[in-house]
Amino acid sequence: MQRIYFDNAATTNLDAEVLDAMMPYLTEKYGNPSSIYSYGRETKMAIENARKSVARILGCKPGEIFFTSGGTESSNTAINAAITDLGCTNIISSALEHHATLHTVENLAAAGKVTLQLVKLDENGHIDLAHMEELLAQAPGKTLITLMHANNEVGNLLKIKAVSELAEKYGAIFHTDMVQTIGHYPVNLSNLNVHFASSAGHKFHGPKGVGILYVNENITIKPMICGGAQERNMRAGTENLYGIVGYAKALELATERYEQDSAYIGELKQYMMTRLRENFDNIGFNGDAAGSSLYTVLNVAFPKTEKSDMLLFNLDMAGICVSGGSACSSGANSVSHVIKAIYNGKSENIVPIRFSFSRHNTKEEVDIVIEKLKELV
Ligand SMILES: Cc1ncc(COP(=O)(O)O)c(C=O)c1O
């Protein structure tokens, strides 16, 4: 059976060129980067070149880039460091955050280490900036703002510049989860005025299990993992050499291809929206699909019926890979925390399905999916 993969917000396939760049470091270049002889020097050099390349693309300094195991580790590290090392006692976040953020801030609040405030959302699921300013103005202590640049389930984009200006005005620390935007949009971290940013390579055709944490040079945090001197004493442990090389290569390719890929994928999303509207009169789009939204993600609200309740399962049976929420909750029948938050808890009449695209998808695939949906809904 031919499969259709419309779940690129969960993960993407590894680019062949990225694999080519990684291969030497899985085979003949196997030296430990901490070793001082030639095997070690060549792998150390590969890591530092990767860091320079990533920093150049993201508009920051190599010293501000730390390689990690991915988005989850980066967000956990940033949030915990803001509390432990930077003196934050209050957190402003939102109900739409990825669990990597949400569970971390909830745990800190449950342990009594911080007060936690969730900022209100507007009718499209965007952050209510006026409410955020109110929260900042009355904050009970030094505040960490942790808000995602783009939501992985519905695609909503944050007004990141406005948030960073508010953070600056009120002396808050700002962490942003850029897992769905780095590698998909041009990003200039030195203009953004954020303190921490998280990213993961597997969202833009890089390898899994590798990401970065950007830490602004004006702040100092303690080591994320203690042990050896890797990552300039900040994250001990022998480096994920081939992962790091792959991350940098994937980011280089994504940057080169940005104009072409974003236009192509954006058109696919538009095409799918048009075809859905033509064929179903009772569907909606979750989040701000036609407005300030990722060009890669389309979250559709199908009306809940006995048939549509089985939609995720039946699409899978037909070889169509999509998700009902985030990857972690796909397969499960429960509506995700993001959809619940957007609907103010009143989402019992819809079946949300997320379609997310990459440059490998085609309009023909969209047509096939539409035909299948006509049978299944
Ligand atoms: C927005 C967002 N944040 C964080 C993560 C976690 O990233 P990782 O799986 O690399 O830890 C993901 C991916 O699932 C994501 O989409």
Image: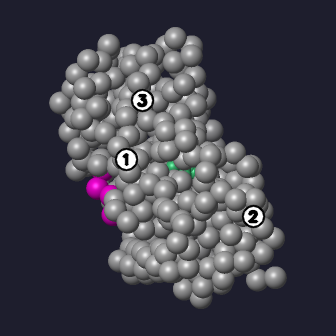
Q: Is mark 3 within 8 Å of ligand 1?
A: no
For disc 3, the marked residue is 118
Q: Which of these two is toward me, 257 or 269?
A: 269
On screen, residue 76 above or below 39: above
**Residue at 70% from the left image edge and 53% from the top image edge:** 330
Query: At numbered mark 2, what does the secondary structure look like: helix, strand or loop?
Result: loop
Instruction: State the mark number for residue 123.
Output: 1
The spot of residue 9 in percent (x, y) is 56, 61
On screen, residue 160 above or below 59: above
Which image quadrant is residue 117 in? top left
Disc with the residue nearer the chain's start (1 vs 3):
3
The quadrant in which the C terminus is found is: bottom right
Disc with the residue nearer the chain's start (2 vs 3):
3
The majority secondary structure of the magenta stretch comes to: loop
For badge 2, the amino acid type reads Lys
For badge 1, the amino acid type reads Glu
The spot of residue 185 in percent (x, y) is 37, 64
**Residue at 44% from the left image edge and 35% from the top image edge:** 94
Closer to the observer: label 2 or label 1? Answer: 2
On screen, residue 103 above or below 314: above
Span colored in magenta:
185-189
What is the distance, in whole Å, between disc 2 and disc 3 at their CAs? Answer: 35 Å
Q: Which of these two is toward me, 57 or 9?
A: 9
Tags 1 and 3 touching, CB below 8 Å? no
For disc 2, the marked residue is 307
On screen, residue 276 above or below 166: below
Disc with the residue nearer the chain's start (2 vs 1):
1
Query: At numbered mark 1, what does the secondary structure look like: helix, strand or loop?
Result: loop
The crowding category of the residue bearing disc 1, from other C-alpha atoms within 10 Å (few below 14, some 14 to 19, many at least 20), is: few
Tags 2 and 3 touching, CB below 8 Å? no
